[in-house]
Image: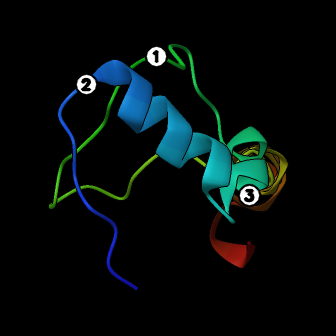
Amino acid sequence: MFIPFEIGEAFARNLDMQDELKEFREEFVSADPELIYLDGNSLGRLPKATVPILRHLVESEWGEGLIRG
């Protein structure tokens, strides 16, 4: 599908409103939701679901279980 490109905030916001994946934005940690984050060598924004998993890994598996974890 070809979408003609225009320069300007109104055009960008209109594209955002049409984005089929926009509801997934709330699934990620974002201290600054206005920040445009374009880094090709990054893991990207942290998924919120990952936080409790990593917390458990660090505190229980590593912290309590040590090498057994």
Where does the image place residue 32, in percent across and percent down from the top left? Answer: 50, 13
Q: CA distance from mark 2 to mark 3?
A: 44 Å
Looking at the image, tell me whether mark 2 or mark 3 is earlier in sequence order: 2
Q: Is residue 5 above or below residue 30?
A: below
On the image, the x and y values in percent for residue 28 come to 66, 43
Residue 54 visible at all: no
Residue at point 84%, 47% (across, down): 52
Q: Would you name the residue on which mark 2 appears?
A: 8
Disc 3 element: helix
Mark 1 highlights which residue? 34
- State the residue at coordinates (74%, 58%): 57
Residue situated in front as seen by the camera: 61 or 1: 1
Q: CA distance from mark 3 to mark 1?
A: 31 Å
Three-letter code for the amino acid on which mark 3 is drawn: Leu
Q: Nearer the viewer, residue 12 or 27?
A: 12
The number of discs equals 3
What residue is shown at x 81% (from left), y 51% (from top)?
Answer: 64
* Number of other residues with Cα within 10 Å of mark 2, as a class: few under 14, some 14 to 19, many 20 or more: few
- The amino acid at mark 1 is Glu
The quarter in which the N terminus is drawn is: bottom left
Badge 3 crowding class, 10 Å Cα cut-off, few under 14, some 14 to 19, many 20 or more, is some
Residue underneath mark 3: 57
Q: Which amino acid type is marked by label 2?
A: Gly
Compare residues 31 and 53 and report the one nearer the observer: 31
Quadrant position of the C terminus in the picture: bottom right
Element at badge 1?
Answer: loop
- Residue 20 visible: yes
Q: Quadrant of residue 65?
A: bottom right
Res 4 quadrant in image: bottom left
Query: Residue at (58%, 26%) from the top-left corner?
Result: 30
Q: Secondary structure at mark 2?
A: loop
Question: Tag 1 or tag 3, which sits nearer the N-term?
Answer: 1
